[in-house]
Amino acid sequence: MTQLILLPGLAGDAAMWLAQVVALAEWNPRITDVHARHASVPDMAAALLADHGGPLILCGASMGGIVAMEAARQAPQRVRGLALLGTNARPETSDMRALREAAIALFEQDRVAEVIEPNVAMAFHPARAADAALVGAYLDFVLRAGATQLIRQNRAIMARPDARAHLGSLRCPTLVMCGDSDLLTPVECSVEIAGLIPGAQLVMVPRCGHMLTMEQPDLVNATLRQWLQQIEARP
């Protein structure tokens, strides 16, 4: 039986998938925590494949999408569908590496809130950045991850493979979604992914930043449901 696996982003956990767990309940989605248990993207993907046998539909947001693409590289015959939300197939840039290294230096001093709180608005569309409940839910799970996880997961992202090399060989149904105002993984990253994977569907989410599942859950859920139904209808 095909399993639907939800993969959180960096420092994320089940909290970022609350709306999807309800909306996609008929597919019995499971949320993985491989990003919190392993130190590299390839190891995370290998653990995902080991933890969940049989055919898989992988739905990954941000870092979760990076892990999903790597799992599809490692075992393309097992991945029946890919949903990639606000993610990036490119390797780390020198500018981002420098920013992450500076943040890691502060995380090592246990100054997590000092790094995260001033930058939280970058994760959301400007119209949602003042939503105290939304921003608070985001801050809660990032701070809950803690310094050790933030350091390890950022290092894993810095060393991530260039997924563009294998995307052209994928043949599974693929949905690529991106907020039209995403500052963390710009629209061009999603456009590139959709252009590389044969037959991929690209959906831009209006008035949305990086946290698609939390900012625009109704549209995201409706799109995912339609896509999953299409996969079910395939012979």
Image (spheres, rainbow, N blue to C red):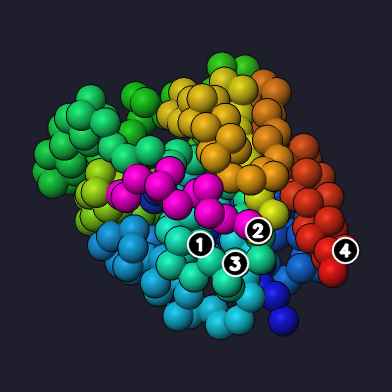
Secondary structure under badge 2?
loop
Outermost residue on the front side: it is: 169
Q: Residue at image x 57%, y 55%? A: 170
For the residues labelled 2 and 4, say whether their Cβ atoms are less than 8 Å apart: no
Q: Which mark is residue 79?
A: 3
- 8 or 141: nearer the viewer: 8
- 209 or 224: nearer the viewer: 224
Q: x and y percent of residue 192 in the render?
A: 52, 32
Outermost residue on the top side: it is: 126
Total count of labels: 4
Cα distance between the residues tagged 2 and 1 = 9 Å
Residue with the mark numbered 2: 172
N-terminal of the two: label 2 or label 1? 1
Q: Is residue 46 left or right of residue 126?
A: left
Give the prevailing secondary structure in the magenta stretch: loop
Q: Is residue 171 above or below residue 94?
A: below
Q: Residue at image x 55%, y 40%? A: 196
Cα distance between the residues tagged 1 and 4 = 21 Å
Cα distance between the residues tagged 3 and 2 = 7 Å
Residue with the mark numbered 1: 72
N-terminal of the two: label 1 or label 4? 1
